[in-house]
Image (cartoon, grey):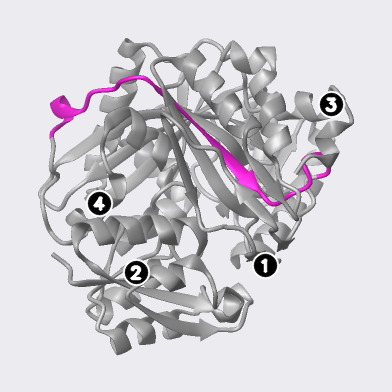
Amino acid sequence: MFKKILIANRGEIAMRILVACREMGIKTVAVYSEADENALHVKYADEDICIGPPRSADSYLNVPAIISAAEITGADAIHPGYGFLSESAYFAEVCEACHVRFIGPDPSVIKLMGDKSRARRAMKKAGLPMLPGSDGPVENEDKAIKLARDIGYPVIIKAVAGGGGRGMRVVRNPDDLTHAIRTAQREAEAAFGVGDVYIEKYLESPKHIEFQILGDHHGNVVHLGERECSVQRRHQKLIEESPSPVLSDKLRKKMGAAVVDAARAVQYTNAGTFEFLMDAENRFYFMEVNTRLQVEHPVTEFVTGVDIVKEQIRIAAGERLSFKQSDVVFTGHSIECRINAEDPVSFRPSPGLIRTFQLSTGPGVRVDTAAHADCTIPPYYDSLIAKVIVYGRDRAEAIARMKRTLEMSVIEGIQTTIPLHLRILADPEFVAGKMTTHFMERLVESKPASGKLAAAG
């Protein structure tokens, strides 16, 4: 087992990894930018090193600085968390070359799954169902026009190296295709350094379902069930839950078995998430694989009792999975709300000093955060300040518990999305479990019940 792990991240996920390490008796190293000098993960880690100025490119994305920090402190492994360098095959390769274990999938798998068109081909070969689309990057506009006509409109343009909705455009008629391709290419080039795009059939109102898997270096792969991620804005998830309200036990077993077979086909190790779109007839189609720990992993931990971060660490250390598929039992229902430092109506970021920070607790409530009273939320990073996760005997109890928790929470000094979450939780479509990926479009277009939403913090 590792003696010391460097945590190459910040905020709540750095704290989450630190907690797992402390329970396992593993020493930790925190890296931080100048903006995070007083952050909680710096305070609670056994050692800490400043890796640069506030800007991510100069600190949390600075590979030489992070590797140097690991070498200086004698860390024998690096956990990247999510975001930043977590899906960088280059970073994983550098770790490997410097004899520091990367806690994540092998670089070759990260590289394969990071190229969406290659991942699509690999998963199709492994037997996962696909939406009609191009087998690789669009070579030229003439071929794109013919392909879109054959697939049938609407289609969606996606960046090969994309994520988070960047380099993505929906096209509903032929006249808009060329402009959409060029726009997506420019956006992809700016965001990822690669302008290649591919075309896929666009589902109008799908659900977004993802499966959590774990695989060790001894050929063992298991799935930990699904998460429902349909409540999202501009492809950014807001609320996640497990299990999905629409999956039957039979469909869960079918999808889980397909995911495990696909993971084995590419020799997947460590944690990963296979993401799917599901149509109104509950037919599912492969979308992508996230080769890292997900923001929403706590809902899976609640309903399975599996500590995913600890399993990641054990797997990276060469140990076998501590359980078999038959040991995985799903109980109850869990919901997670991402609390962002944003205006709940305009979604503008709201950095600044938090004067009061009191998130309600109680039975079945978990809060993952690095925020606290008198801390400053910097403007340089993602606006996520906390995750509130609840567990109930069933979905109705989980919704009631989340509403109670958020209603009894107080954050002052900045604006947060808590009022928005309360509005979502009260929406009849959400309560019925019938939301699709277009749920937020309808909600945002409709007016809030009162003017209190914009003022609440």
Does the image show residue 144? Answer: yes
**Circle 3 sits on which residue?**
448
Mark found first going from the N terminus, 4 or 1:
4
- The quadrant holding residue 372 is bottom right
Mark found first going from the N terminus, 3 or 2:
2
Q: Which three-letter amino acid code belongs to the residue tagged 2?
A: Ala
| Residues marked 1 and 3 touching at CB (< 8 Å) | no
Mark found first going from the N terminus, 2 or 1:
2
The N terminus lies in which quarter of the figure?
bottom left
Q: In this view, does 5 lie to the left or right of 297?
A: left
The C terminus lies in which quarter of the figure?
top right
Q: Position of residue 26 (x, y in %)?
A: 22, 66
Q: Which three-letter amino acid code belongs to the residue tagged 1?
A: Pro
Q: Is residue 262 left or right of residue 67?
A: left
Mark found first going from the N terminus, 3 or 4:
4
Measure the alpha-carbon separation of dots 2 and 1: 28 Å
**Callout 4: 10 Å neighbours few (<14), some, many (20+)?**
some
Q: Residue at x 50, y 79 (%)?
A: 62
**Callout 1: 10 Å neighbours few (<14), some, many (20+)?**
some
Against 288, is 132 above or below?
above
Circle 1 — which element?
A: loop
**Circle 4 sits on which residue?**
310
Give me the disc on residue 92: 2
| Residues marked 3 and 4 touching at CB (< 8 Å) | no
Q: Residue at x 40, y 41 (%)?
A: 297
Q: Position of residue 99 (x, y in %)?
A: 22, 79
Give, as a single range, the part of the protein colored magenta. 324-346
Disc 3 versus disc 2: nearer the observer: 3
Q: Which residue is drawn at 71% across and 52% down?
A: 184
Give me the disc on residue 378: 1
Viewer-proximal residue among 354 and 293: 354
